[in-house]
Amino acid sequence: MTFHAEAIRPQFPSLHLPADDGSLPVFLDNPAGTQVPLGVMQAVTEYYMTMNSNSGGVFATSRRNDEMIQRTREGMADFLNAASASEIVIGPNMTTLCFNLSRSIAQTLAPGDEIILTRMDHDANIAPWTLIARDCGLTLKWVDIRSEDCTLDMDSLEAALSERTKVVATVHASNAVGTVNPIKQIAGMARAVGAWHVVDAVQSAPHVPIDVADIGCDFLLCSSYKFYGPHLGIMWGRSDLLESLPVYKVRPAKDAAPNRWENGTPSYETWHGLLACLDHWERIGEEYGDAELPQFAGRRRQMKRGMTAVQAFERELVTSLIDGLHAIPGVSIAGITDSARFDQRVPTVAIVKEGHQPHEIASYLAANHIYVWSGNYYAVEIMERINRLEGMVRIGIGQYNTIDEINRLLNLLDML
């Protein structure tokens, strides 16, 4: 059975809350955070009713809490195809986790060691590294992009690598223009010079099946509130590195991974929400997945099948969106617009329209109950590189969006 948005829209209560004029809002702000299914909301409530406790106790609610913690880690390990649940670190958001990671890695580096960053990345995968470079006397090297299609300049990356390279930090999919980078190739290039590869997968996780075992990177970070879950960040790391890298923690905290990376008491109720979000992906795979994927089994296979089904649906929508945008006078699109190359992008589209500021366009659409973002979305480097200092309008498709919503957006942009 082919996946389509109408099949899952009833599971998202917020999609059906009408605006003041009675019309339903259109959520195309998804790259900044998706809506969540009812099961996620119910899981948070269930946590408070049945297992609200701290971890490690001998009594019933604490034992239930610890069982939930393990199930959530196992679910994320399946989602990312990690070797073990102990490779899953969960924190408040990706940015915090990346700062923690950078500070830990910094303790292993020496002045003159090199870190490679890209002009395509969100600042959450730039600032943590530029700050330790400043504090530790490290050398920064930058990978450029090709401005005509906003793809990574792989020759620039090759030229930046050296025997002093210790960290290569790259985004999987751009949060600004949607470009998907060849991270498996990048991981191999980093490994060849003995460097660690850190991947920001925040924007790819909602749209692309992720397999850390196949990618070959050393760390990968994402955010569950971008793939229909609660506000949490997740970091996968190679088990040997999670166990051996120095970390900042309180003395009584466990010194085994992944706990040694998780400071303080987390919001366990959102962990339970994350578990429900992963169940949502598994159900999509069970009901709509038809990809063979013989390399996976059990829940991992169903999650990947679900992601593959949604990916195909979203590709149809983004094709209609980009075709429609091309037909509107004055609209310019950043990034890949050739439909034959849409396997190299996620359905995040950045535009401008001649004669109108990005904030003006976003405000006009908001007044008509269509939600998009304007600005640089913390992707400072790429906006400067493509000379869009005022930013752009970002339209982000998710699994619950429909062709009618895309047409509603296009009609309004055409009338502006």
Image (cartoon, rainbow, N blue to C red):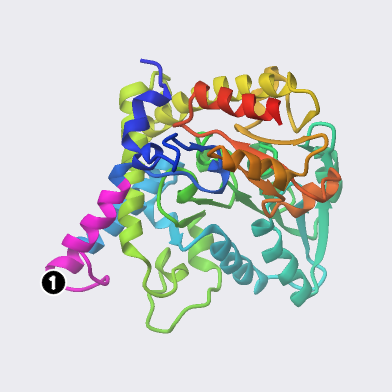
Q: Position of residue 48 (x, y in %)?
A: 22, 63
Q: Quadrant of residue 70?
A: bottom left
Relative horizontal placement of residue 197, taking residue 11 as reference (left or right)? right
Regarding residue 277, the answer to whether it shows in the image is yes
Residue beneath the point at 67% across and 24% down: 322
Residue beneath the point at 35% across and 25% down: 7
- Tell me where the magenta segment starts and ends, as one range: 40-63
Q: Position of residue 67 (x, y in %)?
A: 23, 58
- Relative depth, front residue between 393 and 356: 356
Relative horizontal placement of residue 340, taking residue 215 as reference (left or right)? right
Relative horizontal placement of residue 19, taking residue 354 as reference (left or right)? left
Whether the magenta-drawn stretch holds residue 45 is answered as: yes
| Label 1, residues with CA under 10 Å away: few <14, some 14-19, many ≥20 | few
Q: Position of residue 63 (x, y in %)?
A: 18, 65
Q: Position of residue 374 (x, y in %)?
A: 68, 47
Q: Is residue 386 above or below residue 343?
A: below
Q: Quadrant of residue 86?
A: bottom left
- Relative depth, front residue between 165 and 317: 317
Q: Is residue 146 above or below residue 270?
A: above
